[in-house]
């Protein structure tokens, strides 16, 4: 970083020399040329663009007319270079700064020439169809690629040759260094093309077969990391072959570190697809308790971690600062973010706890936070329940991870416990018969598990009835099937009790009147006609 500071300090010093070595009117004239020139160029390019668009809308132009607008970016860059050269005329510029300005202008001309040639090659599309059919399209595409590469190569060579004062160190090296560099870049380019074609072809050849899915994902994940690795090799080779100045050498080293770090980060990021594939296969097995929400959680968290740590290493590669310094600075920023988003983080950690502990899964019926319903989705922030009235309730995962959850959906069976009451005047024999009837109805009933046989007991003397307790368990725990079976049991009990003359009890009260001395009170109710006849007999 010290080399950069020294370089920019030199630039500032040179600009200060320009200011002190010229009069005010010279600076104003140069600035006016620059501003008015760019405004004129902008107006001119907009005018040409409108003319071309108007011609295209009228559909009165030639076939090649739409291609003319593609030359405008190249012409604008070339005009900008000429305009910068015009701004030098009124000024007295130090030689070192003049070299930098000429280098910038030459760079604009070089880029403009590359864009011009690239767009000129698009005119191959205007060749007659018959000629295009004779010349294979892949061959024509390769010709374009070779011409573009040649244009870039020639533009770079011309730029470097015309800027010997800007890059003096390039011309101090031996010719064999240039030859070696050209050979290395040729090998890298061939390797780039070969590996790209090989990996792309293998990815297509493997297809969608399940057996070769891992190889397909691996080849696909390796495509861009391999390209960046070849680029890093090229930058490193340039740095080692040439004796670069301190600033250029530092730039090359930083570029190599950044590209190398990007290779590792991008490869790890792409390999997360393989991890997702393996987790998806694991979740698809019948002997696991995880679902696709777990896979999604792992995928997103893994990508966030790769990007986070990758960004830290990119900062280290770009700045050269120790990891401890970067972690300390990021720790303070992370603390501020954590305090600002603590509720979100609580819900995120709650999601982790739910995924790991698995108190419920999608489709289970649960009772939590006073809500009874089926789990529709387990998100990163909340869990969504569909209640029986049809309402969708979102409960934050922070609460779902910290409250008692009754998972009704995981019960092994549906237990029914009910009391059947009969009247107090039922004889003992009929009470016993009532218990026997219920046991016969429930014997080997539908949905019975051998470990959970039904239970029937005469267990209580209620205030207004004799109580028979009935227990049975229905398997599997299908609620509506259990309701249907309960209805059948109830109807069978009613029919059997009616046939046996056993009456169901309902709330009644019996009142006993007593006088004293062991309650000798007797009350007789007679017919009024009998009372009148008895009175007449007494009078006679």
Image (cartoon, helix red, strand yellow):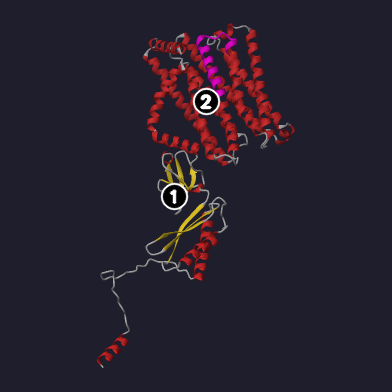
Q: Residue, x 64% and y 22% (percent of image)?
A: 149
Q: Main secondary structure of the magenta part?
A: helix
In the displayed orientation, state which residue is furthest to the right. 134
Nearer-the-camera pick, 142 or 261: 261
Q: Residue, x 50% and y 65% (percent of image)?
A: 433
> Height in image: 424 above or below 184?
below
Query: What is the number of the mark on residue 360?
Result: none
- Whole-percent x, y for residue 441 in the image: 54, 62
Q: Which residue is mark 2?
A: 76
Asked if residue 418 is among those painted magenta in the image, a careful observer would answer no
Q: Earlier in the sequence, mark 2 or mark 1?
A: 2
For residue 24, which quarter of the picture? top left
- Whole-percent x, y for residue 119 in the image: 60, 28
For residue 197, which quarter of the picture? top right
- Whole-percent x, y for residue 405 in the image: 44, 44
Q: Which residues are magenta?
A: 239-264
Give the secondary structure at mark 2: helix
Q: Which residue is mark 1?
A: 372
């Amino acid at each position: 970083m010290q080399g950069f500071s020294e370089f920019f300090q030199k630039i500032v010093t040179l600009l200060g020399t320009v200011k002190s070595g010229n009069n005010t009117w010279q600076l104003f004239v140069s600035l006016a040329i620059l501003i008015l020139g760019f405004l004129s160029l902008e107006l001119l390019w907009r005018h040409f663009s409108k003319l071309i668009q108007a011609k295209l809308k009228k559909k009165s132009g030639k076939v090649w007319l739409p291609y003319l607008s593609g030359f405008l970016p190249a012409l604008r860059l070339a005009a900008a270079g000429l305009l910068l050269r015009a701004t030098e005329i009124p000024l007295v510029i130090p030689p070192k700064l003049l070299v930098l300005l000429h280098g910038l202008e030459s760079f604009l001309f070089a880029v403009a020439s590359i864009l011009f040639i690239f767009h000129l090659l698009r005119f191959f599309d205007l060749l007659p169809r018959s000629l295009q059919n004779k010349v294979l399209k892949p061959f024509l595409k390769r010709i374009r690629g070779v011409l573009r590469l040649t244009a870039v190569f020639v533009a770079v060579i011309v730029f470097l040759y015309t800027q010997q004062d800007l890059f003096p160190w390039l011309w101090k090296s031996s010719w064999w260094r240039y030859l070696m560099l050209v050979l290395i870049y040729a090998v890298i380019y061939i390797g780039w093309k070969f590996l790209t074609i090989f990996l792309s072809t293998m990815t297509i050849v493997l297809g969608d077969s399940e057996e070769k899915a891992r190889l397909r994902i691996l080849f696909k994940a390796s495509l861009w990391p391999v390209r960046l690795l070849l680029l890093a090799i090229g930058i490193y080779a340039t740095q080692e072959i040439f004796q670069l100045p301190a600033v250029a050498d530092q730039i090359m080293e930083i570029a190599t570190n950044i590209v190398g770090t990007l290779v590792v980060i991008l490869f790890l990021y792409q390999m997360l697809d393989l991890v997702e594939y393996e987790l998806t296969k694991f979740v698809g097995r019948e002997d696991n308790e995880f679902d696709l929400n777990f896979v999604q959680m792992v995928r997103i968290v893994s990508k966030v971690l790769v990007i986070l740590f990758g960004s830290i290493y990119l900062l280290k590669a770009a700045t050269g600062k120790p990891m401890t310094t970067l972690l300390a600075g990021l720790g303070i920023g992370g603390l501020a973010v954590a305090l600002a988003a603590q509720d979100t983080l609580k819900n995120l950690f709650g999601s982790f706890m739910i995924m790991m502990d698995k108190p419920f899964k999608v489709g289970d019926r649960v009772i939590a936070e006073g809500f009874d319903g089926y789990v529709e989705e387990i998100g990163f922030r909340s869990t969504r329940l569909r209640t029986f009235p049809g309402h969708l309730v979102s409960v934050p995962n922070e609460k779902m991870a910290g409250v008692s959850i009754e998972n009704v959906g995981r019960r092994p069976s549906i237990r029914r416990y009910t009391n059947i009451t009969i009247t107090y005047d039922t004889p003992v024999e009929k009470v016993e018969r009532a218990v026997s009837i219920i046991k016969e109805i429930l014997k080997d009933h539908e949905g019975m598990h051998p470990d959970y046989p039904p239970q029937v007991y005469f267990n209580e003397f209620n205030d207004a009835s004799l109580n028979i307790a009935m227990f049975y368990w229905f398997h599997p725990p299908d609620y509506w099937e259990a309701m249907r079976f309960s209805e059948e049991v109830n109807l069978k009990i009613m029919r059997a009790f009616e046939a046996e003359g056993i009456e169901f009890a309902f709330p009644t009260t019996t009142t006993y009147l007593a006088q004293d001395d062991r309650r000798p009170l007797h009350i007789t109710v007679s017919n009024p006609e009998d009372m009148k006849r008895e009175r007449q007999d007494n009078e006679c």
